[in-house]
Amino acid sequence: NAGVTQTPKFQVLKTGQSMTLQCAQDMNHEYMSWYRQDPGMGLRLIHYSVGAGITDQGEVPNGYNVSRSTTEDFPLRLLSAAPSQTSVYFCASKPGLSTDTQYFGPGTRLTVL
Amino acid sequence: GQQLNQSPQSMFIQEGEDVSMNCTSSSIFNTWLWYKQDPGEGPVLLIALYKAGELTSNGRLTAQFGITRKDSFLNISASIPSDVGIYFCAGQLSGGSQGNLIFGKGTKLSVKP
């Protein structure tokens, strides 16, 4: 199993550009989530999904959209990037919402100029 | 929302020394987790705790679930250079969106050889 994979590893955007961060898992996990990590702020939940077709907002959802058309994929979309979205983004998955063991992807480092 | 207070924020220690860090919360958690993040990587689960008072070890790491269920501790004995990284605590409630993990802000550990 590859576990949780994320692409790209690094990305630089200009303010106002849009892009999609890709996330995929091959563990048949129902639950997937996106976090952003900023210095001194820890990991903050952006959006999560408890299954295909179901998404919900986390702690810091503004400026981000998600969809879950398949169990395997959970892309994160930035419609109009802003410098405040410069961060490291982690995708994670676990078998279900109530389970605790969560697996993280390697991260995407995004810089918005 | 719920917050976890993790301390210390950073530690600079000599190789061979023992390390202690802790997390406290205003909320009662059903599960406490400890993750380690190596530079440039996603967090990896170290230890999971499920019961108040539980003490669990993983090699040189020992973690405890506080009796009040509002805190947890992680100890690393005889530190080595590869212990360098950021350690995160995470708590989980149960039911509905409370299945999402709540993360502390991390303890950055540096080890001098």
Image (spheres, coloured by chain):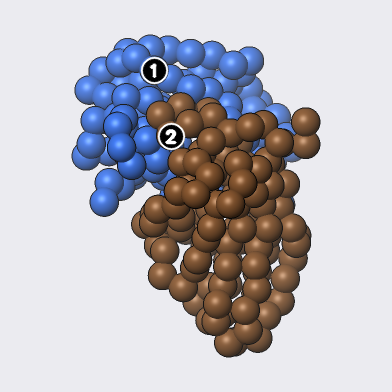
Tell me: residue B44, above or below residue A65: above
Tell me: residue B52, above or below residue B31: above
Question: Dot 1 corresponds to which residue?
Answer: B50
CA distance separating discs 1 and 2: 16 Å
Query: Toward which corner of the image does residue B38 lie, by quadrant?
Result: top right
Query: Which of the pair B74/B65 is nearer the observer?
Result: B65
Residue A110 in picture, x, y percent from top left:
65, 69
Which class describes the residues within 10 Å of circle 2: few (<14), some (14-19), or many (20+)? Answer: many
Image side of residue A77 versus residue A23, left or right: left
Q: Chain of mark 2?
A: A
Residue A64 in picture, x, y percent from top left:
49, 68
* Label 1: which secondary element: loop
Amino acid residing under circle 1: Tyr
Q: Chain of mark 1?
A: B
Q: Quadrant of the C terminus of chain B?
A: top right
Q: Which chain is displayed in blue in the rendered image?
A: B
For chain A, what colour was chosen?
brown
